Amino acid sequence: MSDLRIRLATSDDEDVLGRLDRAIWSPLHSVQPRPEPPYDPFFTERVPPSGHLVAELGGAVVGYLRLGFSTPLACNTHVLQIRGLAVADEARGTGAGRALLRAAQEEARRRGARRLTLRVLGHNTPARRLYKSEGFTVEGILPEEFLLDGKYVDDVFMGMFL
């Protein structure tokens, strides 16, 4: 899509990304309770603006991807993990999620990573389908790892070599 743009986040994106994150919250992809006021900051020392890619459609922020290390260990810095992917409801089907995933692969390579991983809830079929179509494979499953809305849900680990 020609008016879709992916860029690194800046501190100016704090409010819009926080609102987007709260608006798209769902037990389909979140194990955390629904956010309630007062809201935590979107950016923190652990997840600063530089760890986020932002999708803009027609100049409006419509999505983000959070990219970081899966552990704080120096021996694991060759692996980056997608720690969150969100697309506004009105931007679904525009290619924003796919563009964020492709940009994450490029950014991970730029940062010297050899692998890119993620975790997805087993019942999130649309996300799993998207990740698979972009080259991620299932590397492990923790059966019934979470109890969400009265149902046990698997935690699925996916990854790819860059």
Image: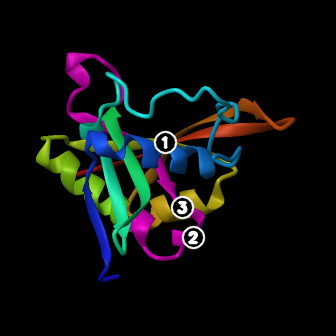
Is 117 drawn above or below residue 137 in the view shown? above
Q: Is residue 76 left or right of residue 17?
A: left
Residue lying farthest top? 73
Which badge, 2 or 1, comes first in the chain's sequence?
1
Is 68 drawn above or below residue 136 in the view shown? above
Residue at 20% from the left image edge and 18% from the top image edge? 74
Is 139 drawn above or below residue 127 in the view shown? above
Please name whichever residue, 134 or 40, is drawn nearer the observer in this view of the structure: 40
Secondary structure state at the residue bearing disc 2: helix
**Label 3 to label 2: alpha-carbon separation:** 5 Å
Q: Say how many tags the image has.
A: 3
Residue pointed to by mark 3: 88
Residue 42 marker: none
> Which part of the image, by quadrant, shows the N terminus?
bottom left
Residue pointed to by mark 2: 90
**Label 1 to label 3: alpha-carbon separation:** 12 Å
| 132 in magenta | no
Residue at 22% from the left image edge and 51% from the top image edge? 162
Residue 83 seen by the camera: no
Kindly identify the amino acid type of the residue bearing the numbered disc 1: Gly
Q: Which residues are magenta?
A: 70-98
**Label 2 to label 1: alpha-carbon separation:** 17 Å
Residue lying farthest right? 150
Give the image location of residue 2, x and y in percent: 29, 83
Residue pointed to by mark 1: 18
